[in-house]
Amino acid sequence: GKQLEIVMKNARDAVTGTTFTLADGASVAAGALAAGVKEGKELERYIRIVGDAATGANVPMMEMAQIFNRIQGTGKLMGTELEMIEYRLPGFSQALAKYLGVAPEEMRKMVSAGKVTVDDFLTVMEGYAGGMAEAYSGTWMGIGKNILANIGIIGEGILEGVFNTSKEQMGKFLAVLRESEDLKAWAKDFGETLRVSFETVVAAIKNAINWWSGLSDGAKKAFLTIAG
């Protein structure tokens, strides 16, 4: 339980100020932990870098996280993952070669030999795409997404308080929803009433359409004139 609290705080802090939701951060956190990232500052940094890279590449956060997790899981950047990153973020290879202090051709040889670690990859990506998610959140399109993301974070906080203080009551309420025969009977009756009402409305609309279609052009023009 304590570890989960830390993980959720890391996810929340990582996406705050961006257009990503707490759900996005939590999903990335789950895969990152499975790939060997430690909860705490390491996890928060990891999620933030994934978000920045996803923003720069204009792809869903989880799509980018899958690539990151493959690199994290093996502990090194390999050729396939480099190509996947370069396809989404053109120019990353040049940034990596510059960081390593070698020519692009030599950099690719180092990648093929497994000499570029996940720490190297994250450091370069942080310098290359760092801050993109936060910067995008300040754009016109980003502001709208940021509002929705923060509503989700606020809602999560509200629900957290509700469930922390009312788990027993909520459990009882769920039991009522599952087991109450009276509630089920009411729902069935209400559904039938709603169906009949809907059919009545549909029939009325059909009759109105048929009536209008049956009018002469002169009558239609007269009605439109009066309506105007």
Image (tube, rainbow, N blue to C red):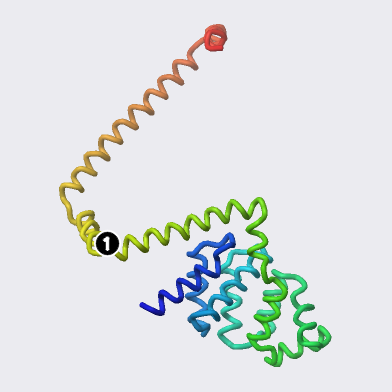
Quick check: 6 left or right of 74?
A: left
Quick check: 216 left or right of 77?
A: left
The vertical placement of 166 against 120, above or below, is above
The vertical placement of 203 against 8, above or below, is above
- Residue matched to label 1: 166
Residue 131: x, y in percent? 67, 68
Residue 75: x, y in percent? 60, 88
The vertical placement of 185 against 58, above or below, is above
The vertical placement of 41 against 194, above or below, is below
Q: Nearer the viewer, residue 59 or 44?
A: 44
Q: Quadrant of residue 142?
A: bottom right
**Quadrant assignment for the C terminus:** top right
**Quadrant assignment for the N terminus:** bottom left
Residue 112: x, y in percent? 71, 89
Local secondary structure at mark 1: helix
- The residue carrying pointer 1 sits among few (fewer than 14), some (14 to 19) or many (20 or more) residues within 10 Å by Cα, namely few
Quick check: 116 left or right of 182?
A: right
At x 20%, y 59%, the residue is: 172
Residue 211: x, y in percent? 44, 15
Q: Quadrant of residue 199?
A: top left
Number of marks drawn: 1
Q: Nearer the viewer, residue 197 or 52?
A: 52
At x 76%, y 78%, the residue is: 93
The amino acid sitting under disc 1 is Ser
At x 55%, y 7%, the residue is: 222
